[in-house]
Image (cartoon, coloured by chain):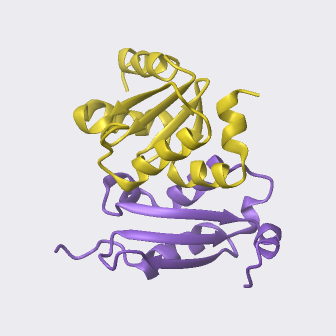
Amino acid sequence: MTDEFKSRIDGMVREKRIVVFMKGTPAMPMCGFSAAVVKALREAGAQDLSAHDVLSDPELRDGIKEYSSWPTIPQVYVDGKFVGGADIVRDLHRQGELSRLVAGS
Amino acid sequence: MDRPVLNAEHIRARIEAALLGATVEIADTTGGGDHYRASVVAEAFEGKGPVERHRMVYAALGDEMRSGALHALELSTYSPAEWTRAGGSR
C-alpha cells in the first residue's frame, strides 16, 4: 500500500466519529451485512455517520482490507479505531455496547 | 454455478487445524456453498477481544477469505467458559 493511499484512508477513518466502509450506501445498501451494520448503528443512536461505498471505488475495496487487516466488508470505525465487521457490530449491539460506543462514553 | 472452493468440512478442518482443540459448528446458510455461519469455541480465544479472535479465524482460512471464494462467513467466537455460559455443549 502506498503512503499516499494509506494517508487517504487515515483521513477517511477520521472524517466523522463513525465511519462505515460498505457495499452500497446507507439509503441503498447492496449487501445484507452492510445493511445490518447501518441499521444496528442507527438503532444504537448514530445519527451522523460517514459511509463509503467500496463498490464505486475498486481501489478502496481492496485497500481497506489491507489497511484494516480485515478480509471482509463492511467495516466500522469509531473515533478512528477499527471496531469490526458485521458479526462484531451485531454482537456489540446485542450486548448493548454499541450504543455506548456510539455515544462516546 | 461454480463448484464451491471451500465446503463446510474444509472450513471446519482449516479452523480446527489452526486453533488447537477448537470445536466448530458450521452451517451453509443459503445452500449455495459460499455463505456459511460458524460458531467456533477455542481455548485460544480466552482473554482476546473480538477483533483479534476473528483475525485468528480469518488467518486460518487464508486466501479463500480474501479472494472472495468464501463470500460470507458469519462468525461467533467463544472461549470454552463463554460457550458454557451461553448454554452450549461440546
Residue at 52%, 19% (x, y): give it.
A16
Q: Quadrant of residue A7?
A: top left
Q: Quadrant of the C terminus of chain A?
A: top right
Q: Residue at x 57, y 22 (%)?
A: A17
Above or below, comparing residue B69 to residue A93 in the picture: below
Q: Tell me if I can see residue B24 in this picture.
A: yes
Q: Quadrant of residue B84?
A: bottom right
User: Residue B62 in the image: x percent, y percent?
Assistant: 44, 58
How many marks on residues?
0
**Residue A68 placement (x, y as % from top left):** 50, 36
Which color is chain A depicted in? yellow
Colour purple belongs to chain: B
Quadrant (top left, top right, bottom left, bottom right) of the N terminus of chain A = top left
Where does the image place residue B57, in percent across and percent down from the top left? 56, 60
In the displayed structure, A6 sits above or below A71; it is above
| Residue furthest bottom in the image | B90
Q: Which residue is at 36% across, 20% downward?
A: A5
Q: Residue at x 57, y 43 (%)?
A: A43
Q: Decide if residue A90 is on the left or right side of residue A67.
A: right
Of residues A100 and A59, which is closer to you in this image?
A100
- Pick whichever, A91 or A41, lies toward us: A41
State the image coordinates of residue B69 (x, y, percent, origin top left): 30, 62
Left or right: B17 as drawn, with respect to A54: right
Q: Is residue B85 above or below residue A52?
A: below
Judge whether residue A72 can be spotted in this image: no
